[in-house]
Amino acid sequence: MTVTELLLARAEDDSTGLLFEDSSWTWREHVRQCADHAAVLDSLLTGPVKHVGVLADNVPSFSFLLGGCAFAGSVLVGLNPTRRGAALERDIRLADCQLVLTEGRHACLLDGMDVRVLDLDGPEWASLLASGAGSPLSPVPASADDLLMLIFTSGTSGDPKAVRCTQDKIAWPGRMLASRFDLSSSDCVYLSMPMFHSNAIMAGWSVGLAAGAALALRRRFSASGFLPDVRRFGVTYANYVGKPLSYVLATPKLPDDADNPLRIVYGNEGAEADLAEFGRRFGCHVVDAFGSTEGGIGFARTVDTPPGSLGTLPPDVAILDPETGQECAPHVVGELVNTSGPGAFAGYYKNPAADAERLRDGRYHTGDLAYVDENGFCFFAGRLGDWLRVDGENLGTAPIERILLRHPAIAEAAVYAVPDPAVGDQVVAALVLAEPLSPESFGKFLARQTDLGPKQLPRFVRVVPELPRTSTYKIVKRHLVAEGVRGPVWSRPGKECSYEEEHITE
């Protein structure tokens, strides 16, 4: 399956294809724009490696360029506007960008870099597009395994890696989700997540393309603008990753919140308490899935999936002990592994060491921790980098975070490790509070949580104004680890759930 095929299927479609602010295009016009952009890219990119960086918000040019790359046999490199200086230059060099196309508002980020830059809002680009206008719709032959896009990982555990996204890797989930949710040309898909990230492309852009639904672009996500946009564009499907549902729920409630056309909200990493509340408040069905930029493993929740669970393990997916490679017993944390091979993972770009880390012994190693309960339902337990070893026992951070978030005063929680002076780790919890909370009442709350084991009890608690996050709302725990427990903290001197305030300087 290819993106090129999905675009060509829309070439004679006069239904609405793209909406942005006060402008609109039919799918026929969208495909024509893709052909024009392909002609320009073909004139600008030379040699065997035809990679173009795009440094832009969710604007129509991003959609036209992605389709243009599919038609021209080029590769679009999604660049993150929150990256700066040497970090952004490193991404551009790693991805072999011959050219960077940017909005004028981001052009200053590229000053002094040794790469050709064209302003998407400037006269030179306008002139090039004019010269390519009316180009024949004659895309280069495309296969499912052809590279179409490089998408950088969020970089929560180190420098972002460029994930190879083939034509099929983008087209297949779009077609699957469009079919799963019965989407058609009568629907409207809302894209407010950043298009340089996989969630927007694979759970948004390609879904609308496959369904022939209208794509409504929002330059950047806005909690206060979400519901007005849903009503204005007639949005029936929206995607998300991370915290956006929480941000929308934090807006003032109105009696007519459910009076809107929204039907399906699909994404991943939503807070468990927010999923049901969002559906109730806005009258829609929220489906929180499990996924990553790399792919390799996917879960499908069903109606009998318990709260907080990813679902049952798919065929050929197992939870293995990272040290022994043996399958873990129920309730024992291990690594999620695809035992049959790479799945949808097409590798990292120019990073054979990272490829080798993912693919070992013919298996795809996700780097994600999980466990299954006695009924076979799987629960996420964090990343391998979140692995805690307390008194000889391996623990994941996610189960502790889920328990902490039960307290109504705790808006956000991140659990991480600091070294124990003797051996192993000590558990630290960084909390963002929605309302005041005392160390005493926090300790009493933990004492009532019967599923919180004694080794999972935080040794230290830090109350922070906000958690460090990437532009795609993922928590950057390495920043918390670097901060350690310096400053004012609540500490637990003994084994009981009793905390007292202190100030740690080292």
Image: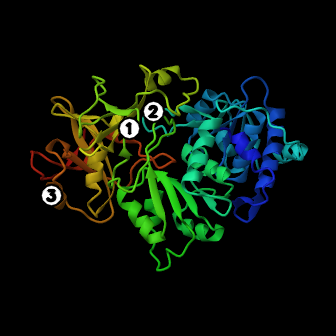
Say which of 372 and 192 sits in front.
372
Say which of 93 and 264 sits in front.
264
Q: Which mark is residue 448?
A: 3
- x then y, percent, for residue 482: 35, 37
Question: Which quadrant would the N terminus be assigned to in this image?
Answer: top right
Which mark is first along the chain, 2 or 1? 2
| Residue at x 33%, y 63% (from the top left corner) | 434
Q: How far apart in space, not on screen, are marks 3 and 2 (Cα)?
A: 37 Å
Q: How far apart in space, not on screen, are marks 1 and 2 (Cα)?
A: 8 Å
Instruction: Say if mark 1 contacts mark 2, CB within 8 Å.
Output: yes
Amino acid type indicated by mark 2: Gly
**Snapshot quadrant of residue 237:** bottom right
From the image, tell me which residue sits under label 2: 158
Which mark is first along the chain, 2 or 3? 2
Secondary structure beneath label 3: loop
Q: How far apart in space, not on screen, are marks 1 and 3 (Cα)?
A: 30 Å
Determine if residue 37 is in view: yes
Amino acid type indicated by mark 3: Arg
Say which of 41 and 205 sits in front.
205
Horizontal side of residue 325 vs 356, given as left or right: left
Horizontal side of residue 345 vs 276, given as left or right: right
**Snapshot quadrant of residue 328:** top left
Which mark is first along the chain, 3 or 1? 3
